Image (spheres, helix red, strand yellow):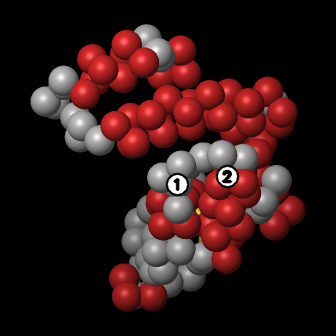
Amino acid sequence: MHAAKMTEKDVEKLMQNSGIIRNRRKIEAAISNARLFLEIQKEFGSFCNYLKSFLPDGKPIINKWKTLKQIPVTSPLSDEISKDMKKRGFKFFGSTICYSHLQAVGYINDHLVHCHCYKQ
């Protein structure tokens, strides 16, 4: 079932699932966040478009790190997106999670300059 369609009955069922972290607030936030995600898709056409609206010229950020110690866990960009998402009602989506997501989807390239993936 799609998380956005879950009900209180589904929350109770998830609370009994030993395979997940059974924190009611996090479960309820995941459901609420799924609904808010759909609202962003409707407003921007896609979540991708929403994120790109924050990127300089809508293009990924290519960093030029030489050591792992240089790679940050947040940035002004992830702070801004996280703040906007919180304003929209998202829960448990701070700047660190946001930065990690931006890395994962390729909107921030934090591969070290000598890594074979850097130019990809």
Q: Is residue 23 visible?
A: yes
Residue at x 34% of width, y 37% of height: 24
Would you identify the image quadrant in which residue 57 lies? bottom right
Quadrant showing the N terminus: top left
Q: Observer-nearest residue: 94 or 98?
A: 94
As displayed, is residue 77 above or below residue 88? below
x%, y% of residue 5?
A: 53, 15
Looking at the rendered structure, the secondary structure element under dot 1 is loop
Report if the CB atoms under discs 1 and 2 are less than 8 Å apart. Answer: yes
- Circle 2 residue: 85
Q: Is residue 49 left or right of residue 118?
A: right
Q: Amino acid at mark 1?
A: Phe
Q: What residue is drawn where x is 16% and y is 31%? A: 19
Task: Identify residue type, mark 2.
Answer: Met
Q: Quadrant of residue 16?
A: top left
Residue at image mark 1 = 93
Question: Taking 40 as reference, is 5 left or right?
Answer: left
Residue 98 at what x, y percent from top left?
55, 59
Judged from the image, the secondary structure of the residue bearing numbered disc 2 is: helix
Give percent across and percent down for residue 72.
48, 80
Q: Is residue 29 above or below residue 118?
A: above
Crowd band around label 1 with a 10 angstrom C-alpha radius: few (<14), some (14–19), many (20+): some
On the image, which quarter does residue 34 sit in? top right
Q: Earlier in the sequence, mark 1 or mark 2?
A: 2
